[in-house]
Image (cartoon, rainbow, N blue to C red):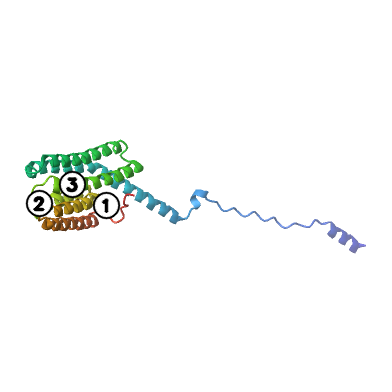
Amino acid sequence: MAVSLRMTSISRTPVSQAPAQAPEPQKPTLPAALQVPAHAYLARLAALHDEAAETAYLANLLGRAPWAAGLLGAAALMTVLTSAQSASPVAVSVWVALVAIAVAAIGRTYGKAIEVPFDRETLKDFARSLSAILLFAGTAWGAGIFLALANVGPVAALAFTATVSALLAAILRARDVAFCFLVPATAMGAFCALMRDGGFAAMLALLAGGLLVAGAAILFERVTIPASRTQHG
């Protein structure tokens, strides 16, 4: 009897339950914007740096454009005053008109771009327009060997094309844009010099001067401008 009562009391004793485990703390989750890998941020930073460098390059080119136009106008006036007295007045007038068109085109393009001087798309359009204008200006300037100069000796030919091309490259400080003037001016000048009687030496002087100016422009850009600068598209 005592054994049965003891068993009954034991059976009625409540069984202690195991303590419930505390929930594991959840790890804090970062916002989706912060879960981007670090290299993506570095790539974006590099892209922003390239955009800023390109904008600064194009803005500087915009600021130098009036000086380039002034150089062409002053050089044309000096040519007329010093070397064109014995040339045909009609030919000189045609040449001056061509150079004046180029100068006016640079001024008009500059006037449109300066209204929004730090907009990348506007600056890119300006750079493309300036390159096209300089192609025309270089061709017109090289034609001055035939139209504006009476005597085409090697020294005169070299001073007429290479000097102006070198000064223009120094003003613009943009090799690709400066070449838009240098290449057609040298090619057209050499052709016009060859068309004149005994102009073979002048043609060689023009070609040598053009190559010398091109090499100097490339060397100047590599020395003075950082390699990380982005070229204009």
Mark 1 nearby-residue class (10 Å; few <14, some 14–19, many ≥20): some
Quadrant of image for the N terminus: bottom right
Report the front residue among 224 and 62.
62
Mark 3 or mark 1: whose residue is earlier in sequence:
3
Q: Which mark is residue 152?
A: 2
Identity of the amino acid at label 3? Trp
Q: Nearer the viewer, mark 3 or mark 1?
A: 3
| In the image, residue 116 above or below residue 150 | above
Number of residue marks:
3
Residue under the image location 8 percent in, 41 percent down: 81
Residue occupied by mark 3 = 141
Mark 1 or mark 2: whose residue is earlier in sequence:
2
Mark 2 nearby-residue class (10 Å; few <14, some 14–19, many ≥20): many
Report the front residue among 106 and 41.
106
Residue under the image location 33 percent in, 43 percent down: 125
Distance between the alpha carbons at the discs numbered 3 and 1: 18 Å
Q: Which mark is residue 187?
A: none
Q: Nearer the viewer, mark 3 or mark 2?
A: 2
Residue occupied by mark 1 = 176
Q: Position of residue 66 (x, y in %)?
A: 21, 40
